Image (cartoon, rainbow, N blue to C red):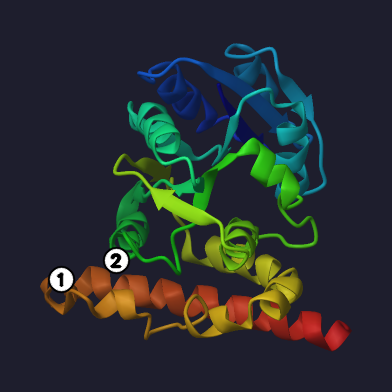
Amino acid sequence: MVSIIITTKNEQDVLNSLLNSIKRQTYQNIELIVVDNNSTDTTKKIASNFTKLVYNFGPERSAQRNFGVKKAKGEYVLILDADMVLTKNVIKSSVSIMTQQKKLGGLVIPEKSFGKGFWAKCKAFERQFYLGDENIEAARLFKKSLYKRFGGYDISITGPEDWDLPLRMKKAGVKIGRIDEFILHNERNFSPFKSARKKFYYGLHARNYLKRHPEMVFTQGNLFFRSSFYKDPAKLFANPLITIGFFYVRFLEMSAALLGITLSLIKR
């Protein structure tokens, strides 16, 4: 069994698409758990149409995920955000690889983005460069026993927790695999300024992550010189307007994140 843990907070505009994509999976030995954080819209009602396992827990995403795993009965846990959509063979492919390669502790499921408007196209363009980049892609499916052994997600980290748990596992010798199926990430009507505000908030809570993984400052934290951007330079020059747009978004996001990190260090 695969236990799918979905964390939500006011996600009525996207949750139905994710839940329907789970319903359409070609592998059906699954358990669906939704952990909501005090939504004031119809999120819980939508979730209850698909599963009885709808809980309320907070205060942040890491705590929600850990709570969901505590309730899980599956051998594997898949951690999802509400703004995702699964291609139909994600679970089937994941279980197949995990059962064939017993030494794997987790799996990366690569992501593609979609959304409305120019800025969403910029984010989708940026994400193309990250496919196969081990510094950017993070595992989302884990053996539940291993997840628990490592204490799950660090509740003191919000934002970089996606990378922290797999990094701690890999540094301890755990092997992480990868499938060829995709998660589709719904950027919605993407706003660079809203995204920058979110990155600022994440920066305020990134101190423990950077202390634990200082090497990631030069990979994830690099604004313009991530090596993955330049593996296919022809793609950058072929889409000049989109390229300028995504670097502009990166500039806003990373400036906001850096400000948040700086303030967090000053407060300490």
With respect to residue 57, does 3 lie above or below?
above
Expressed as whole percent of the image width and height from the top left, the position of residue 144 reads 65, 37
Indicate the quadrant containing the C terminus: top left, top right, bottom left or bottom right.
bottom right
Res. 39 in view: no
Report the quarter where the N terminus lies.
top right
Disc 2 marks a residue whose amino acid type is Phe
Foreground residue among 148 and 33: 148
Q: Secondary structure at mark 2?
A: loop
Q: Are marks 1 and 2 in contact (CB under 8 Å)?
A: yes
Reading the image, the residue beneath label 2 is: 129
Q: CA distance from mark 1 to mark 2?
A: 10 Å
- Graded by Cα atoms within 10 Å as few (under 14), some (14 to 19) or many (20 or more), the crowding at tag 1 reads some
* Residue bearing the label numbered 1: 235
Left or right? Give the position of 268 relative to 121: right
Q: Residue 164: x, y in percent?
A: 63, 63
Write the residue at 44% across / 75% down: 250
Q: Is residue 76 above or below residue 218?
A: above
- Circle nearer the N terminus (1, 2): 2
- Seen at 29% across and 76% down, the residue is 229
Position of 116 with respect to 40 (left or right) is left
